[in-house]
Image (tube, rainbow, N blue to C red):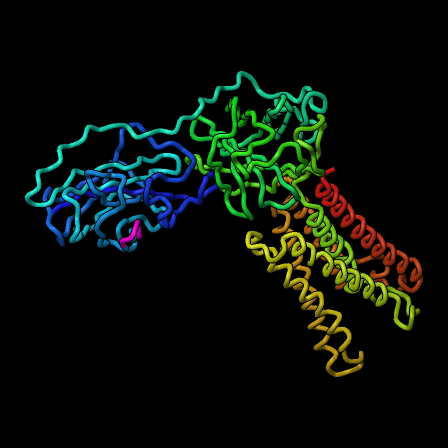
């Protein structure tokens, strides 16, 4: 009959800080022996809200024993094993049967398949029931152990069940409860006052965003400083965030294979740690504590932390030498229970490499990569100015251009064609830049890239249709006219939609509050002028040339034509100047000047 459950470990909620990957899927065989979550944090030693119960006290080989994990609060992950009660550090014994395969799964700990049970996701649970099968060569007494994770940093290791003994064997007396072994960590101090930019470029190197800000006076200032102190370097990091702020040392301007340092808010405390980013994955927290003199401060929505690190850390190969030069990344984002999420905005990246253990200097950086700036600027020039002006001319000014030709074609057509060819060329060049920057398709850009692909396809379709168009007197000419107009109109509409979505991309440096106002203003301006010219074309807006007084028309025909011409000239100039103004404001903002 009975047995006792042994352990559970977990590794739930995958997010930034882990010295080994977190496992929301419960694949935690790496922790079978120690049953210790590899989160880089000490287990909880306070009152445990979870219990591990069995339904028997005696068992025989082949018996089925019900094991139940329950608690007064929810948990996100667990690892359960059965072990020899006389040698709890031995391998897991016996095997389990699941009662709910949707929330639990079997693991192989040691040499026996199904010798452990864990969670299948990080969904919150309050109770788990499984069945343990006693093996033929079962030890005299068995104890079940479980590690339960409430949250990423909150977990209890090796919670024991009552010991169950084989029939005819004297029960092992209960062992006195001893607190779990904790990882010794130095206690960080609280900073007495905010950091200051005083001394930047003289006693310490500084990276500031916005340029020239002072974290002591400006709560919106992102600030990173580092100053050599003998064989160590003192770092200071500050920025407005409710979750975390972080910086990284990188050999290039791409995220991946970087030496990362995080200051993560956890309730009313700040956890300061070192980590390493491999590829574009979540950082893995350092297995050893390499930071000293740690201090932090929380005030007015700003996280600040300071620490000291040796120039060389030979015991940890993922810590970069501070004698070399690196690009600096600075990022911030949300955190939950000490776990960090993806940064809210594009990281601030220094414009040049800097030797960390070198002379003091003031560094500059940008949150918008140069390739993405060019992408945005070229697309805006193509569709806010060149393309919109080309279609505007063809729609409302065709009858007013002289019949003279230029290179064998009417002047209005040559101007229209030139502007539209420029639009297509700019679109093609701009379209390739994000792929060069990302190295492929971006999965986090939402609908923007799909709209961009559609706009490019329609833009390329236009010159193909124009090349195959029938003569003006052909009976099929109307088909081309409608297709040409329809494809152009849809392309313009989708280009505007792509602009709205593109302004929200992390890689484009545009203030959230102003970008929609300016873009909406551009759209309203274009619609207004098109409506005015459309009404004029239909005769609803009359100039002196359109008066019903036929005698006056005959007498003042020249004057009326002049009024009509001036009306259209003013509308065209207003269109070009207005669009140029909106375009310049966007380019100015994107450039970060």
| Residue 589 spot, x, y in % from top left | 71, 41
Give the residues in magenta.
108-112
| Residue 541 spot, x, y in % from top left | 77, 57
Res. 187 image quadrant: top left
Q: Is residue 515 magenta?
A: no
The residue at the far left in this view is: 168
Whether residue 202 is visible here, answered yes or no, is: yes
- Relative side of 162 to 506, left or right: left
| Residue 455 spot, x, y in % from top left | 66, 62
Q: Quadrant of the C terminus?
A: top right
- Relative side of 419 to 224, left or right: right
> Residue 107, relative to residue 537: is it above or below?
above
Which residue is at a point 75% across and 58% down the rendered structure image? 426
Whether residue 541 is visible here, answered yes or no, is: no
Which residue is at a point 66% across and 22% down the rendered structure image? 197
Res. 323 image quadrant: top right
Q: Main secondary structure of the magenta part?
A: strand
Which residue is at a point 45% across and 23% down the rendered structure image? 186
The residue at the far top in this view is: 192
Of residue 121 and residue 386, the one placed in the foreground of this image is 121
Which residue is at a point 54% across and 41% down the rendered structure image? 343
Of residue 79 and residue 95, the one placed in the foreground of this image is 95
Res. 402 image quadrant: bottom right
| Residue 565 spot, x, y in % from top left | 87, 58
> Residue 453, relative to residue 254: is it above or below?
below
Of residue 225 and residue 561, the one placed in the foreground of this image is 225
> Residue 587, relative to residue 479: is it above or below?
above
> Residue 54, relative to residue 450: is it above or below?
above
């Amino acid at each position: 009959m009975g047995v006792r459950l042994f352990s559970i470990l977990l590794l739930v909620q995958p997010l930034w800080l882990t010295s080994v990957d977190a496992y929301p899927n419960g694949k935690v065989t790496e922790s079978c022996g120690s049953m210790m979550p590899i989160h880089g944090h000490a287990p909880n030693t306070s009152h445990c809200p979870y219990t591990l119960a069995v339904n028997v006290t005696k068992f025989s080989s082949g018996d089925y024993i019900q094991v139940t994990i329950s608690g007064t609060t929810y948990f996100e992950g667990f690892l359960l094993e059965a072990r020899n009660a006389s040698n709890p550090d031995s391998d897991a014994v016996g095997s389990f049967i699941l009662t709910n395969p949707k929330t639990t799964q079997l693991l192989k700990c040691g040499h026996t398949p199904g010798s452990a049970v864990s969670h299948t996701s990080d969904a919150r649970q309050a109770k788990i029931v499984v069945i343990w099968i006693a093996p033929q060569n079962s030890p005299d007494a068995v104890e079940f152990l479980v590690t339960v994770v409430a949250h990423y940093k909150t977990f209890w290791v090796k919670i024991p069940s009552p010991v169950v003994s084989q029939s005819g064997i004297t029960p092992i007396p209960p062992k006195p409860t001893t607190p779990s072994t904790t990882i010794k960590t130095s206690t960080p101090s609280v900073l007495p006052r905010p950091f200051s930019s005083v001394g930047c470029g003289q006693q310490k190197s500084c990276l500031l965003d916005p340029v020239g800000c002072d974290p002591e006076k400006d709560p919106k200032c992102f600030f990173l400083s580092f100053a050599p102190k003998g064989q160590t370097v003192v770092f200071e990091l500050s920025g407005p965030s409710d979750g975390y702020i972080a910086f990284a040392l990188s050999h290039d301007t791409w995220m991946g294979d970087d030496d990362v340092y995080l200051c993560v808010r956890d309730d009313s405390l700040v956890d300061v740690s070192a980590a390493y980013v491999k590829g574009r994955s979540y950082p893995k927290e350092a297995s050893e504590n390499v930071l000293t003199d740690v201090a932090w401060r929380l005030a007015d929505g700003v996280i600040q932390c300071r620490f000291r690190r040796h120039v060389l850390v030979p015991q940890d190969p993922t810590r970069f030498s501070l004698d070399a030069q690196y690009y600096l990344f600075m990022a911030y984002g949300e955190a939950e229970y000490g776990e960090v999420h993806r940064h809210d905005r594009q990281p601030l990246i220094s414009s040049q490499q800097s030797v960390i253990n070198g002379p003091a200097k003031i560094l500059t950086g940008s949150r918008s990569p140069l390739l993405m700036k060019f992408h945005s600027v070229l697309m805006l020039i193509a569709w806010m100015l060149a393309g919109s002006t080309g279609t505007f001319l063809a729609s409302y000014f065709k009858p007013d251009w002289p019949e003279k030709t230029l290179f064998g074609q009417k002047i209005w057509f040559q101007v229209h064609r030139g502007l539209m060819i420029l639009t297509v060329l700019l679109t093609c060049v701009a379209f390739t830049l994000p792929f060069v920057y990302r190295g492929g398709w971006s999965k986090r850009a939402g609908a923007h890239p799909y709209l961009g692909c559609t706009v490019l396809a329609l833009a390329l379709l236009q010159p193909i249709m124009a090349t195959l168009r029938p003569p003006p007197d052909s009976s099929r000419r109307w088909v081309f006219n409608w297709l040409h107009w329809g494809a152009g109109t849809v392309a313009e509409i989708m280009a505007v939609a792509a602009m709205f979505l593109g302004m929200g991309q992390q890689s484009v440096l545009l203030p959230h509050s102003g970008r929609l106002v300016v873009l909406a203003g551009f759209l309203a301006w274009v619609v207004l002028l098109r409506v005015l010219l459309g009404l004029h074309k239909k005769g609803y807006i009359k100039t002196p040339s359109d008066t019903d007084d036929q005698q006056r028309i005959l007498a003042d025909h020249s004057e009326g034509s002049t009024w009509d011409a001036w009306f259209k000239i003013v509308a065209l100039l207003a269109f070009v100047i207005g669009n140029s103004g909106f375009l310049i404001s966007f380019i100015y903002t994107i450039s970060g000047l």
